[in-house]
Image (cartoon, rainbow, N blue to C red):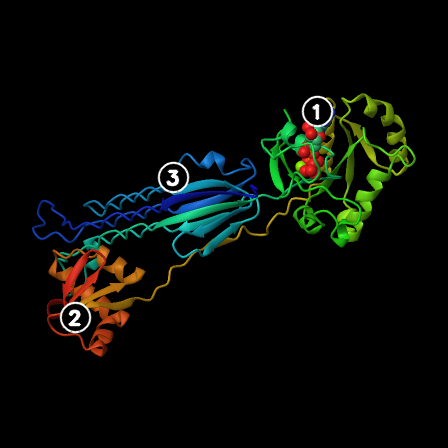
Protein backbone atom coordinates (compact mmCIF):
# COMPACT_ATOMS: atom_id res chain seq x y z
CA UNK A 1 0.00 0.00 0.00
CA UNK A 2 1.50 3.29 -1.03
CA UNK A 3 -0.50 5.97 0.66
CA UNK A 4 2.51 7.96 1.58
CA UNK A 5 5.45 8.96 -0.42
CA UNK A 6 8.55 9.51 1.69
CA UNK A 7 12.09 10.80 1.32
CA UNK A 8 14.85 11.94 3.61
CA UNK A 9 17.02 14.94 2.85
CA UNK A 10 19.63 17.07 4.51
CA UNK A 11 19.20 20.83 4.43
CA UNK A 12 21.31 23.72 5.67
CA UNK A 13 20.83 27.44 5.74
CA UNK A 14 23.78 29.58 4.72
CA UNK A 15 26.38 30.70 7.24
CA UNK A 16 26.84 34.37 7.91
CA UNK A 17 30.01 35.96 6.53
CA UNK A 18 32.77 36.95 8.97
CA UNK A 19 33.18 40.49 10.14
CA UNK A 20 36.62 41.87 9.41
CA UNK A 21 39.28 43.83 11.29
CA UNK A 22 40.64 46.73 9.27
CA UNK A 23 41.80 50.29 9.79
CA UNK A 24 41.63 53.30 7.56
CA UNK A 25 44.94 54.22 5.97
CA UNK A 26 44.70 57.63 4.46
CA UNK A 27 47.35 60.07 3.50
CA UNK A 28 47.84 62.57 6.29
CA UNK A 29 45.76 60.46 8.69
CA UNK A 30 48.32 58.46 10.61
CA UNK A 31 45.87 56.81 13.00
CA UNK A 32 42.88 55.85 10.85
CA UNK A 33 39.75 54.62 12.60
CA UNK A 34 38.45 51.07 12.42
CA UNK A 35 36.86 50.29 9.05
CA UNK A 36 36.18 46.53 9.02
CA UNK A 37 32.78 45.80 7.48
CA UNK A 38 30.18 43.28 8.67
CA UNK A 39 29.69 39.90 7.06
CA UNK A 40 26.53 39.34 5.03
CA UNK A 41 23.65 37.19 6.22
CA UNK A 42 23.47 33.54 5.18
CA UNK A 43 20.56 32.58 2.94
CA UNK A 44 17.42 31.03 4.49
CA UNK A 45 16.28 27.53 3.66
CA UNK A 46 12.65 27.75 2.64
CA UNK A 47 10.00 25.25 1.58
CA UNK A 48 7.24 26.28 -0.78
CA UNK A 49 4.13 24.26 -1.56
CA UNK A 50 3.32 24.01 -5.24
CA UNK A 51 0.64 22.43 -7.40
CA UNK A 52 3.19 21.63 -10.10
CA UNK A 53 4.40 18.55 -8.25
CA UNK A 54 2.17 15.66 -7.28
CA UNK A 55 4.73 13.28 -5.81
CA UNK A 56 8.06 13.44 -3.99
CA UNK A 57 9.57 11.32 -6.73
CA UNK A 58 11.05 14.29 -8.56
CA UNK A 59 12.86 15.26 -5.38
CA UNK A 60 14.30 11.87 -4.66
CA UNK A 61 17.44 12.48 -6.73
CA UNK A 62 18.80 15.34 -4.66
CA UNK A 63 19.54 14.57 -1.05
CA UNK A 64 21.46 17.63 0.12
CA UNK A 65 20.23 21.21 -0.10
CA UNK A 66 22.22 24.22 1.02
CA UNK A 67 21.43 27.91 0.88
CA UNK A 68 24.24 30.33 0.00
CA UNK A 69 26.67 31.63 2.62
CA UNK A 70 26.96 35.33 3.24
CA UNK A 71 30.14 36.99 1.98
CA UNK A 72 32.74 38.18 4.46
CA UNK A 73 32.98 41.85 5.26
CA UNK A 74 35.66 43.96 3.61
CA UNK A 75 37.93 46.81 4.66
CA UNK A 76 36.71 50.34 4.07
CA UNK A 77 33.39 49.57 5.78
CA UNK A 78 32.26 47.31 3.00
CA UNK A 79 29.51 44.94 4.07
CA UNK A 80 29.56 41.41 2.69
CA UNK A 81 26.74 40.48 0.32
CA UNK A 82 23.88 38.41 1.77
CA UNK A 83 23.68 34.77 0.67
CA UNK A 84 20.76 33.83 -1.57
CA UNK A 85 17.96 31.93 0.10
CA UNK A 86 17.13 28.54 -1.29
CA UNK A 87 13.46 27.83 -2.01
CA UNK A 88 12.69 24.13 -2.28
CA UNK A 89 9.42 23.42 -4.01
CA UNK A 90 7.41 20.54 -2.63
CA UNK A 91 3.95 19.24 -3.48
CA UNK A 92 0.97 20.54 -1.53
CA UNK A 93 0.31 18.02 1.25
CA UNK A 94 3.94 17.59 2.26
CA UNK A 95 4.69 17.09 5.94
CA UNK A 96 8.18 17.96 7.14
CA UNK A 97 9.61 16.09 10.12
CA UNK A 98 12.87 16.53 11.97
CA UNK A 99 14.46 13.13 11.62
CA UNK A 100 16.23 13.05 14.93
CA UNK A 101 13.40 14.11 17.20
CA UNK A 102 10.57 12.92 14.98
CA UNK A 103 8.90 16.29 15.56
CA UNK A 104 6.56 17.62 12.89
CA UNK A 105 8.04 20.94 11.79
CA UNK A 106 5.44 22.00 9.29
CA UNK A 107 2.49 20.94 7.24
CA UNK A 108 2.49 22.53 3.80
CA UNK A 109 -1.17 22.25 3.05
CA UNK A 110 -1.93 25.09 0.71
CA UNK A 111 -0.56 26.30 -2.57
CA UNK A 112 2.02 29.06 -2.35
CA UNK A 113 2.61 28.56 1.37
CA UNK A 114 6.20 29.27 2.35
CA UNK A 115 7.91 28.09 5.50
CA UNK A 116 11.38 29.03 6.64
CA UNK A 117 12.81 25.78 7.92
CA UNK A 118 16.24 27.16 8.80
CA UNK A 119 17.18 30.82 9.02
CA UNK A 120 20.49 31.87 7.56
CA UNK A 121 23.27 32.70 10.00
CA UNK A 122 23.78 36.32 10.99
CA UNK A 123 26.79 38.07 9.54
CA UNK A 124 29.62 38.73 12.01
CA UNK A 125 30.19 42.35 12.99
CA UNK A 126 33.26 44.09 11.67
CA UNK A 127 35.60 45.95 14.01
CA UNK A 128 34.08 49.31 13.04
CA UNK A 129 31.08 48.29 15.16
CA UNK A 130 33.18 47.83 18.25
CA UNK A 131 34.57 51.34 18.28
CA UNK A 132 33.64 53.51 21.23
CA UNK A 133 34.97 56.54 23.03
CA UNK A 134 37.26 54.35 25.10
CA UNK A 135 38.04 51.80 22.45
CA UNK A 136 39.26 53.69 19.41
CA UNK A 137 41.20 50.91 17.76
CA UNK A 138 39.21 47.75 18.38
CA UNK A 139 41.03 44.63 17.27
CA UNK A 140 37.94 42.55 17.44
CA UNK A 141 35.47 41.23 14.90
CA UNK A 142 32.84 38.55 15.04
CA UNK A 143 32.82 35.47 12.90
CA UNK A 144 29.67 34.75 10.99
CA UNK A 145 26.97 32.66 12.63
CA UNK A 146 27.03 29.15 11.21
CA UNK A 147 24.02 28.02 9.18
CA UNK A 148 21.68 25.43 10.66
CA UNK A 149 21.74 21.90 9.35
CA UNK A 150 18.84 19.54 9.69
CA UNK A 151 18.06 16.05 8.60
CA UNK A 152 14.48 16.02 7.45
CA UNK A 153 11.98 13.42 6.53
CA UNK A 154 9.38 14.55 4.02
CA UNK A 155 6.14 12.74 3.82
CA UNK A 156 3.46 13.34 1.23
CA UNK A 157 -0.08 12.64 2.23
CA UNK A 158 -1.92 11.67 -0.88
CA UNK A 159 -5.56 12.50 -0.95
CA UNK A 160 -7.48 10.38 -3.41
CA UNK A 161 -9.73 12.41 -5.70
CA UNK A 162 -11.58 9.35 -6.96
CA UNK A 163 -12.59 6.22 -5.05
CA UNK A 164 -13.23 2.96 -6.86
CA UNK A 165 -16.14 0.94 -5.53
CA UNK A 166 -17.90 -2.21 -6.68
CA UNK A 167 -18.54 -5.87 -6.01
CA UNK A 168 -15.58 -8.23 -5.68
CA UNK A 169 -14.24 -9.28 -9.07
CA UNK A 170 -15.83 -6.30 -10.84
CA UNK A 171 -12.38 -5.45 -12.21
CA UNK A 172 -11.45 -2.50 -9.97
CA UNK A 173 -7.79 -3.41 -9.59
CA UNK A 174 -7.47 -4.22 -13.27
CA UNK A 175 -8.92 -0.81 -14.06
CA UNK A 176 -6.53 1.00 -11.73
CA UNK A 177 -3.60 -0.85 -13.30
CA UNK A 178 -4.83 0.14 -16.75
CA UNK A 179 -5.09 3.85 -16.01
CA UNK A 180 -2.38 4.55 -13.42
CA UNK A 181 1.09 3.77 -12.19
CA UNK A 182 -0.30 1.58 -9.40
CA UNK A 183 0.17 -2.18 -9.56
CA UNK A 184 -2.47 -3.77 -7.33
CA UNK A 185 -2.87 -7.53 -7.51
CA UNK A 186 -5.46 -8.87 -9.96
CA UNK A 187 -6.94 -12.36 -9.84
CA UNK A 188 -10.02 -14.27 -10.84
CA UNK A 189 -11.48 -14.66 -7.38
CA UNK A 190 -13.38 -12.35 -5.04
CA UNK A 191 -11.51 -10.34 -2.40
CA UNK A 192 -8.18 -10.35 -4.18
CA UNK A 193 -7.63 -6.84 -2.92
CA UNK A 194 -7.20 -6.78 0.85
CA UNK A 195 -5.65 -3.36 1.27
CA UNK A 196 -6.35 -0.08 -0.41
CA UNK A 197 -3.88 1.17 -2.99
CA UNK A 198 -3.50 4.48 -4.72
CA UNK A 199 -2.54 5.39 -8.24
CA UNK A 200 -1.80 8.66 -9.99
CA UNK A 201 -3.82 8.96 -13.18
CA UNK A 202 -2.48 11.36 -15.78
CA UNK A 203 -4.62 11.43 -18.91
CA UNK A 204 -2.83 13.05 -21.81
CA UNK A 205 -3.37 16.79 -21.96
CA UNK A 206 -5.39 16.78 -18.73
CA UNK A 207 -4.44 17.34 -15.13
CA UNK A 208 -3.41 14.41 -12.97
CA UNK A 209 -5.60 13.04 -10.25
CA UNK A 210 -5.32 10.33 -7.68
CA UNK A 211 -7.47 7.19 -7.61
CA UNK A 212 -7.94 4.73 -4.75
CA UNK A 213 -8.69 1.03 -5.16
CA UNK A 214 -10.29 -0.65 -2.17
CA UNK A 215 -11.55 -4.18 -1.46
CA UNK A 216 -14.88 -5.18 -2.97
CA UNK A 217 -18.14 -4.78 -1.05
CA UNK A 218 -20.91 -7.33 -0.83
CA UNK A 219 -24.45 -7.33 0.49
CA UNK A 220 -24.37 -7.11 4.29
CA UNK A 221 -20.87 -5.62 4.31
CA UNK A 222 -22.02 -3.03 6.85
CA UNK A 223 -22.75 -5.95 9.18
CA UNK A 224 -19.33 -7.41 8.57
CA UNK A 225 -20.04 -9.67 5.58
CA UNK A 226 -17.03 -10.22 3.33
CA UNK A 227 -14.33 -7.79 4.35
CA UNK A 228 -16.77 -5.40 5.95
CA UNK A 229 -16.84 -1.68 5.31
CA UNK A 230 -14.18 -0.23 7.58
CA UNK A 231 -11.81 0.43 4.64
CA UNK A 232 -14.44 2.78 3.19
CA UNK A 233 -12.93 5.44 5.42
CA UNK A 234 -10.04 5.53 2.96
CA UNK A 235 -12.35 7.01 0.36
CA UNK A 236 -14.37 9.23 2.67
CA UNK A 237 -12.42 12.27 1.58
CA UNK A 238 -12.57 11.61 -2.16
CA UNK A 239 -14.54 13.95 -4.34
CA UNK A 240 -16.05 11.44 -6.67
CA UNK A 241 -16.85 7.73 -6.69
CA UNK A 242 -16.24 5.55 -9.72
CA UNK A 243 -18.55 2.61 -9.43
CA UNK A 244 -17.47 -0.39 -11.49
CA UNK A 245 -20.08 -2.96 -12.45
CA UNK A 246 -19.25 -6.21 -14.25
CA UNK A 247 -21.98 -6.12 -16.90
CA UNK A 248 -21.31 -9.70 -17.97
CA UNK A 249 -22.67 -10.84 -14.60
CA UNK A 250 -25.98 -9.05 -14.21
CA UNK A 251 -29.20 -10.45 -12.82
CA UNK A 252 -31.65 -10.56 -15.75
CA UNK A 253 -34.58 -10.27 -13.32
CA UNK A 254 -33.24 -7.18 -11.69
CA UNK A 255 -30.71 -5.63 -13.99
CA UNK A 256 -29.59 -2.87 -11.60
CA UNK A 257 -29.37 -5.02 -8.47
CA UNK A 258 -25.57 -5.21 -8.47
CA UNK A 259 -25.46 -1.45 -8.55
CA UNK A 260 -28.16 -1.03 -5.90
CA UNK A 261 -26.47 -3.40 -3.46
CA UNK A 262 -23.31 -1.33 -3.40
CA UNK A 263 -25.17 1.95 -3.07
CA UNK A 264 -27.14 0.71 -0.10
CA UNK A 265 -23.97 -0.56 1.59
CA UNK A 266 -22.39 2.87 1.07
CA UNK A 267 -25.43 4.51 2.59
CA UNK A 268 -25.27 2.20 5.59
CA UNK A 269 -21.67 3.22 6.13
CA UNK A 270 -22.24 6.93 5.75
CA UNK A 271 -24.85 9.07 4.10
CA UNK A 272 -22.17 11.55 3.20
CA UNK A 273 -20.30 8.92 1.21
CA UNK A 274 -23.48 7.82 -0.57
CA UNK A 275 -24.19 11.45 -1.46
CA UNK A 276 -20.92 11.90 -3.33
CA UNK A 277 -21.16 12.26 -7.10
CA UNK A 278 -21.07 8.80 -8.70
CA UNK A 279 -20.03 7.79 -12.19
CA UNK A 280 -20.71 4.24 -13.29
CA UNK A 281 -18.38 2.27 -15.51
CA UNK A 282 -20.10 -0.71 -17.11
CA UNK A 283 -16.99 -2.90 -17.15
CA UNK A 284 -15.77 -5.98 -19.07
CA UNK A 285 -17.44 -4.71 -22.25
CA UNK A 286 -15.03 -6.88 -24.24
CA UNK A 287 -17.17 -9.92 -23.30
CA UNK A 288 -20.14 -10.84 -25.54
CA UNK A 289 -22.53 -11.16 -22.56
CA UNK A 290 -21.77 -7.62 -21.56
CA UNK A 291 -22.62 -6.21 -24.94
CA UNK A 292 -25.93 -7.99 -24.82
CA UNK A 293 -26.90 -6.78 -21.36
CA UNK A 294 -25.50 -3.28 -21.57
CA UNK A 295 -28.44 -1.40 -23.20
CA UNK A 296 -30.92 -2.50 -20.55
CA UNK A 297 -28.45 -1.81 -17.75
CA UNK A 298 -27.73 1.64 -19.06
CA UNK A 299 -31.39 2.45 -19.29
CA UNK A 300 -32.05 1.33 -15.72
CA UNK A 301 -29.23 3.44 -14.39
CA UNK A 302 -30.07 6.51 -16.38
CA UNK A 303 -33.54 6.23 -14.92
CA UNK A 304 -31.76 6.63 -11.55
CA UNK A 305 -30.06 9.74 -12.88
CA UNK A 306 -26.60 8.14 -13.11
CA UNK A 307 -24.11 8.71 -15.90
CA UNK A 308 -22.88 5.42 -17.43
CA UNK A 309 -19.81 4.67 -19.50
CA UNK A 310 -19.08 1.41 -21.31
CA UNK A 311 -15.47 0.37 -20.71
CA UNK A 312 -13.09 -2.55 -20.52
CA UNK A 313 -10.20 -2.44 -18.11
CA UNK A 314 -8.72 -5.39 -19.98
CA UNK A 315 -8.67 -3.83 -23.47
CA UNK A 316 -8.91 -0.17 -22.39
CA UNK A 317 -11.84 0.43 -24.71
CA UNK A 318 -13.91 3.42 -23.63
CA UNK A 319 -11.41 4.30 -20.93
CA UNK A 320 -10.21 7.59 -22.45
CA UNK A 321 -13.71 9.04 -22.66
CA UNK A 322 -14.39 8.05 -19.07
CA UNK A 323 -11.18 9.62 -17.77
CA UNK A 324 -11.88 12.79 -19.67
CA UNK A 325 -15.30 12.99 -18.10
CA UNK A 326 -13.83 12.38 -14.64
CA UNK A 327 -11.31 15.16 -15.15
CA UNK A 328 -14.06 17.56 -16.13
CA UNK A 329 -16.10 16.61 -13.09
CA UNK A 330 -13.12 17.07 -10.80
CA UNK A 331 -12.51 20.50 -12.27
CA UNK A 332 -16.06 21.47 -11.44
CA UNK A 333 -15.92 19.93 -8.00
CA UNK A 334 -12.63 21.54 -7.12
CA UNK A 335 -13.13 23.62 -4.03
CA UNK A 336 -12.69 27.32 -4.61
CA UNK A 337 -9.06 28.22 -4.13
CA UNK A 338 -8.52 29.69 -0.72
CA UNK A 339 -6.56 32.88 -0.74
CA UNK A 340 -4.97 33.39 2.61
CA UNK A 341 -5.11 36.98 3.86
CA UNK A 342 -1.43 37.22 4.48
CA UNK A 343 0.72 34.29 3.65
CA UNK A 344 1.59 32.92 7.02
CA UNK A 345 5.18 32.33 7.79
CA UNK A 346 5.92 29.74 10.37
CA UNK A 347 9.34 29.52 11.84
CA UNK A 348 10.79 26.56 13.57
CA UNK A 349 12.49 28.05 16.57
CA UNK A 350 15.25 26.24 18.32
CA UNK A 351 15.31 25.98 22.04
CA UNK A 352 17.51 28.74 23.35
CA UNK A 353 18.54 27.14 26.65
CA UNK A 354 21.73 25.18 27.19
CA UNK A 355 22.56 22.02 29.03
CA UNK A 356 25.64 21.20 31.03
CA UNK A 357 26.49 17.56 31.36
CA UNK A 358 29.32 15.84 33.16
CA UNK A 359 30.99 13.27 30.93
CA UNK A 360 33.49 12.09 33.51
CA UNK A 361 35.25 13.57 36.52
CA UNK A 362 36.32 17.07 35.52
CA UNK A 363 35.04 16.72 31.93
CA UNK A 364 31.91 18.62 30.98
CA UNK A 365 29.95 19.09 27.79
CA UNK A 366 27.80 22.12 27.18
CA UNK A 367 25.16 22.02 24.46
CA UNK A 368 22.64 24.56 23.31
CA UNK A 369 22.19 26.54 20.13
CA UNK A 370 22.85 29.99 21.52
CA UNK A 371 25.97 29.13 23.45
CA UNK A 372 27.34 27.02 20.60
CA UNK A 373 26.64 29.89 18.23
CA UNK A 374 28.49 32.26 20.51
CA UNK A 375 31.53 29.98 20.53
CA UNK A 376 31.41 29.55 16.76
CA UNK A 377 31.27 33.32 16.22
CA UNK A 378 34.12 34.24 18.52
CA UNK A 379 37.63 34.74 17.27
CA UNK A 380 39.70 33.26 20.08
CA UNK A 381 42.93 34.65 18.73
CA UNK A 382 41.85 38.07 19.92
CA UNK A 383 42.00 39.02 23.60
CA UNK A 384 39.34 41.59 23.03
CA UNK A 385 37.03 39.03 21.49
CA UNK A 386 37.61 36.72 24.45
CA UNK A 387 36.70 39.52 26.84
CA UNK A 388 33.44 40.09 24.94
CA UNK A 389 32.82 36.33 24.95
CA UNK A 390 33.12 36.20 28.72
CA UNK A 391 30.80 39.13 29.16
CA UNK A 392 28.20 37.40 27.02
CA UNK A 393 28.53 34.17 28.98
CA UNK A 394 27.89 36.12 32.11
CA UNK A 395 24.80 37.65 30.55
CA UNK A 396 23.51 34.19 29.62
CA UNK A 397 23.82 33.22 33.26
CA UNK A 398 26.39 30.60 32.40
CA UNK A 399 29.10 31.72 34.79
CA UNK A 400 26.64 31.67 37.66
CA UNK A 401 25.55 28.17 36.73
CA UNK A 402 29.16 27.02 36.83
CA UNK A 403 29.58 28.33 40.33
CA UNK A 404 26.45 26.42 41.34
CA UNK A 405 27.90 23.30 39.76
CA UNK A 406 30.88 23.54 42.00
CA UNK A 407 33.19 22.88 39.10
CA UNK A 408 36.88 22.52 39.89
CA UNK A 409 39.48 24.95 38.62
CA UNK A 410 41.09 22.28 36.49
CA UNK A 411 37.86 21.13 34.92
CA UNK A 412 37.46 21.28 31.16
CA UNK A 413 34.30 22.33 29.34
CA UNK A 414 33.64 21.40 25.73
CA UNK A 415 31.35 23.77 23.85
CA UNK A 416 30.89 23.13 20.14
CA UNK A 417 34.35 22.56 18.72
CA UNK A 418 36.28 24.29 21.51
CA UNK A 419 37.58 23.17 24.87
CA UNK A 420 37.76 25.64 27.71
CA UNK A 421 39.75 25.35 30.88
CA UNK A 422 37.66 26.60 33.77
CA UNK A 423 40.54 28.56 35.26
CA UNK A 424 41.41 30.35 32.08
CA UNK A 425 38.00 31.34 30.82
CA UNK A 426 35.42 31.35 33.48
CA UNK A 427 37.00 32.90 36.54
N1 LIG B 1 -12.74 -9.88 -19.78
C1 LIG B 1 -12.40 -9.02 -18.84
N2 LIG B 1 -11.95 -9.45 -17.66
C2 LIG B 1 -11.60 -8.54 -16.71
C3 LIG B 1 -11.72 -7.15 -16.94
N3 LIG B 1 -11.31 -6.50 -15.84
C4 LIG B 1 -10.98 -7.43 -14.95
N4 LIG B 1 -11.13 -8.68 -15.45
C5 LIG B 1 -10.86 -9.95 -14.78
O1 LIG B 1 -11.72 -10.06 -13.65
C6 LIG B 1 -11.06 -10.68 -12.57
C7 LIG B 1 -11.09 -9.81 -11.35
O2 LIG B 1 -10.34 -8.63 -11.60
P1 LIG B 1 -9.79 -7.71 -10.45
O3 LIG B 1 -9.25 -6.50 -11.10
O4 LIG B 1 -8.93 -8.46 -9.53
O5 LIG B 1 -11.17 -7.37 -9.73
P2 LIG B 1 -11.40 -6.54 -8.37
O6 LIG B 1 -12.67 -5.79 -8.54
O7 LIG B 1 -10.21 -5.75 -8.03
O8 LIG B 1 -11.63 -7.72 -7.35
P3 LIG B 1 -11.42 -7.75 -5.76
O9 LIG B 1 -10.14 -7.08 -5.45
O10 LIG B 1 -11.39 -9.18 -5.45
O11 LIG B 1 -12.59 -7.04 -5.19
C8 LIG B 1 -9.65 -10.98 -13.05
O12 LIG B 1 -9.59 -12.31 -13.50
C9 LIG B 1 -9.47 -10.02 -14.21
O13 LIG B 1 -8.56 -10.51 -15.17
C10 LIG B 1 -12.22 -6.72 -18.23
O14 LIG B 1 -12.35 -5.55 -18.54
N5 LIG B 1 -12.54 -7.70 -19.12
MG1 LIG C 1 -9.04 -5.80 -6.46
Instruction: Say the numbered circle drawn on residue 320.
Output: 1
Observer-nearest residue: 142 or 241? Answer: 241
Q: Identify which residue is drawn at 24% across, 71% down.
A: 398
Instruction: Say the numbered circle drawn on residue 63.
Output: 3
In the rendered image, which quarter is residue 252 located in? top right
Q: For the residue labelled by badge 1, is the local secondary structure a helix, a strand or a loop?
A: helix
Q: Residues within 10 Å of mark 1 (few under 14, many from 20)?
A: some
Q: Identify which residue is drawn at 35% across, 64% down.
A: 352
With 160 as the anchor, is 108 left or right in this view? left
The image quadrant in which ligand 2 is located: top right
* Label 3 residue near ligand 2, CB within 8 Å: no
Alpha-carbon span between mark 3 and mark 2:
41 Å
Q: Position of residue 229 (x, y in %)?
A: 72, 50
Q: Position of residue 200 (x, y in %)?
A: 60, 34
Q: For the residue labelled by badge 3, is the local secondary structure a helix, a strand or a loop?
A: loop
Observer-nearest residue: 327 or 177? Answer: 177
With 220 as the anchor, is 4 left or right in this view? left
Q: Identify which residue is drawn at 64% across, 29% down.
A: 179
Instruction: Say the numbered circle drawn on residue 361.
Output: 2
Query: From the image, which quarter does the C terminus lie in?
Result: bottom left
With 192 as the anchor, is 7 left or right in this view? left
Q: Which numbered disc, 3 or 1, marks the residue that appears first in the sequence?
A: 3
Q: Which numbered disc, 2 or 1, marks the residue that appears first in the sequence?
A: 1
Q: For the residue labelled by badge 2, is the local secondary structure a helix, a strand or a loop?
A: loop
Amino acid sequence: MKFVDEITIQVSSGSGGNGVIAFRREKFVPMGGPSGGDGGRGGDLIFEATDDLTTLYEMSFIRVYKAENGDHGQPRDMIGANGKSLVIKVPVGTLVYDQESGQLLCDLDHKGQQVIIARGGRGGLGNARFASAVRRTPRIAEKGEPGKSLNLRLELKLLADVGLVGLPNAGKSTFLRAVSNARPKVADYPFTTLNPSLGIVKPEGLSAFCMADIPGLIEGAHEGAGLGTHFLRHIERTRLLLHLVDVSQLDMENIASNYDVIMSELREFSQELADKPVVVAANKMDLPDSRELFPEFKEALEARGVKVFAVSGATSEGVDDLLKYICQQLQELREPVQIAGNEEEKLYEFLEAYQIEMLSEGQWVVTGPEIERLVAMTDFTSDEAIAVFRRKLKKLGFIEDLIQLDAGEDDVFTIGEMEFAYREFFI
